[in-house]
Each structure stands twice: as C-alpha cells, then as structure tokens.
Amino acid sequence: MKVLSGIQPTGRFHWGNYFGAIRQYIELQDNEQSFYFIADLHALTTVRDPKVLRQNIQDSALDLLALGLQPEKATLFRQSDVPEVAELTWLLMTITQMHLLEKCHAYKDKKARGLAADAGLFTYPVLMAADILMYDSNVVPVGVDQVQHIEVTRDLAQRFNSLYGDDCLVLPEAHVLDSSAKVPGTDGEKMSKSYGNTIPLFDTPKKIRKIINRIKTDSTPVEDPKTPEACAVFNLYRLFATPQQQDELAARYRAGGMGYGEAKTTLYEAAMAYFSESFEKRADLEQRPDDVEDILLQGAKQARQKARDVLERVRTACGLKSLPPEL
Ligand code: ADP
Ligand code: TRP
C-alpha cells in the first residue's frame, strides 16, 4: 500500500484531529510507502499572517512527531518543499470541469453564507488531488469530511487517464475510520477550530483541565441517574478508555449519585495518562529545532524524488517535454 495524507497547519491540533486523522496516520506508517505532509499551501487560503503560519507549521511538525510519527518509517514533509505539486495542480486544472468544483462543500458553504470565496478556495480540491496523485498514492486516510475530495481526485485521475493514457495516474481510495466524524467538542457539537469548541492536544495540564471543566452538560441533579451516551464527557472518555473502563463509567452514570464534575475528572485523568509519553516527547523535541528541520528536509528530499518521477510521466503523457535538467 502507498499511503499518503496531509493535515493543514491552521492552528493547534486538537483531540478531533488526533482521533479523526493523526492516529490513523500513525497506525499506517509501517506500509510500503507512507507519506505525510503539513499542508502549508492549503493553509494559505485561511492563515494570512506569515508569523502565525510559520509557528503553526513548526507546531504541526512537533505535534506529529511527538504523537508517534517515526521518520524512519514515515516520510514527513512540508507540502511547499515539493514545488512539483504546484505544476501538477496546473496540469490537472486544465482538465477540471467547473461544475465538479462548484459542488465541493468548502466553497459551497462559504458561498451559501454570502461570503466572497477566492480562487484558492475554489480550486483547493485540485491542489489536494495533485497532493495525492503526485506520489502514486493508493490509500488516503482521512476524516469523513474529506471523502468528497478523494472522489474529486478519482474523477480527475480518470479523466486525465482517458485523455492521455490509462496507466498515467493511480486512482486512490479513501480510508475512513468510523469514529472519525464523531469527536464532540466542549459544546457537544463536532469538535472544530471553526466552532471554538476544541480541546488542544498539547497545552499546560492546567489549561486542559480548565477546558474540560467547560464541557457542556445538562442540569440533571447529582443524585439522579444519567444517560452516558447523551453526554459529551462520556463520549470523549470512550476515546481513551478500554471497553471495560467504559462500562464502569457508564454504570456509574446510570446508577445516579455521580456528578458531572466527577466524570470530568475521570476524563481528564484518562486523557493525561493517554498522552503522557507524547507530552514528554514534545518537550524534548522543542529543545532540538535543528533535528526537527533535518527530519522535514530529509522527508522533502524523498518525496521530491518520487514527485519528479511522476511529473516526468505526466508531462510526457500530455505532450510537454521532459523536465529540463537543473539549470
Ligand atoms: P478543524 O475542523 O478543527 O479545522 P481540520 O478540518 O483541519 O480541523 O481537520 C483535520 C483532520 O482532522 C481532518 O482529517 C478531519 O477529518 C479531522 N477532524 C477534525 N475535527 C474532527 C472531529 N471533531 N472528529 C473527527 N475528526 C476530525
Ligand atoms: N484537505 C485536507 C484537510 O483539510 C488536508 C489535505 C490536503 C489532504 N491535501 C491532502 C488530506 C491530501 C489528504 C490527502 O483535512
């Protein structure tokens, strides 16, 4: 399997990103090819402050490594370190029908809210298709919200192949985890940066505790029985707990006599234990920025080798000359 995925450095990663995306990357890193990149070119459609973007990119690299991405197994790189992807985006753009992009949700949602969308947001799925097709990827681990983009990628690859030759581009498949749509935020809705309801993966324990305390619960009195499945605290706890631990907490909800404050403490402790190794690893990496940069550059070197091969094939197929030698 040739696995590839990207994640946008648009802010600090949260529990939704981990359970919906990053954990899958890590589980798949033992494959024949596993490429993971920080989608900084994509992030430019939303992050307009260069200082913030630089910091986000650095934080993303630290977070991914701290959470268990191993550079010996997986190739980790910055999207913009492989400029070939911008060329492939153009080549794909020339065969992309407008209606395909008009129905994509990021653009459609923005338009429906009466906001002006720029061409970057409109053509975002084409850049994402190039990210995937650039490395002959056949498996793309993503959250459910990204499945539409994988469909677009398949459409574009099929169209390109039917115009220029059957074996030119590899058709990818989405690899979606069932739980990926379901990580709730502090308000019980889907956890997302855009809703301001996130629980960060890495912050001070005190801050994380404070955010957990803010999770919305109903007003059932302490002594009354409660429904675990209807409670965001319980649904978050499930991410960290074994089935047996889940059953135990569920039983305490149903029995009554336990307040939500206690459930929040249980959640906090479970989360801190779950991520304790990653906290230590991140603190260590933070002291070694040069090593982190080396990992990213080494990753980019490997990714570019593959990208050049694919671009050569694509250029030739559509009638362009081979890549010129380095001038
Ligand atoms: P955000 O919504 O916070 O801006 P992104 O859109 O950058 O997050 O998501 C990055 C990845 O994390 C995507 O693959 C997405 O599916 C996954 N993801 C984000 N939030 C959640 C969530 N609440 N539950 C499950 N997966 C999520
Ligand atoms: N669009 C994805 C997101 O917002 C990030 C991304 C960019 C991506 N290029 C990709 C994911 C290629 C998978 C494959 O989550």
Image (tube, rainbow, N blue to C red):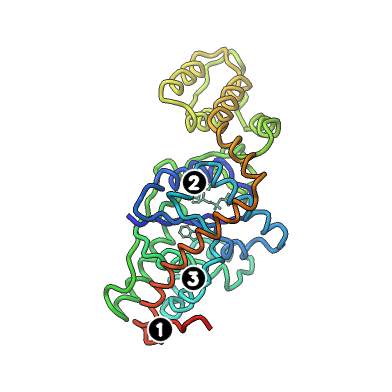
Disc 2 vs disc 1: Cβ atoms closer than 8 Å?
Answer: no
Q: Position of residue 92 (x, y in %)?
A: 43, 76
| Tags 2 and 3 touching, CB below 8 Å | no
Above or below, 58 relative to 123:
above
In the image, residue 93 sits, relative to residue 194, either above or below, namely below
Question: Secondary structure beneath disc 1?
Answer: loop
Query: Which one is earlier in the sequence, the residue at label 2 or at label 1?
Result: 2
Which structural element holds mark 3?
Answer: helix
Residue 77 point in image, percent of width and height: 52, 58
Q: Mark 1 — residue?
A: 322
**What residue do we see at 70% from left, 57% from top?**
52
- Per the model, the C-alpha gap separating discs 2 and 3 is 23 Å
Q: Residues within 10 Å of mark 3 (few under 14, many from 20)?
A: many
Pick whichever, 110 or 266, lies toward us: 266
**Numbered mark located on residue 69 in the image:** 2
Distance in Å between CA atoms under marks 2 and 1: 35 Å
Given the image, on which type of amino acid does mark 1 rest?
Ser
Could one spot residue 50 in this view of the protein? yes
Q: Are marks 3 and 1 in contact (CB under 8 Å)?
A: no
Q: Looking at the image, tell me whether mark 3 or mark 1 is earlier in sequence order.
A: 3
Depicted 259 relative to depicted 1: above or below: above
- Residue 139: x and y, percent? 36, 56
For residue 68, above or below residue 265: below
In-front residue for pair 102/310: 310
Please tell me whether mark 3 or mark 1 is closer to you in this view. Answer: 1
User: Quadrant of the rendered structure where residue 272 is?
Assistant: top right
Task: Identify the disc placed on residue 206.
Answer: none
Amino acid under label 3?
Val
- Looking at the rendered structure, which numbered label has been put on residue 85? 3
- Of residues 252 and 40, the one nearer the viewer is 40
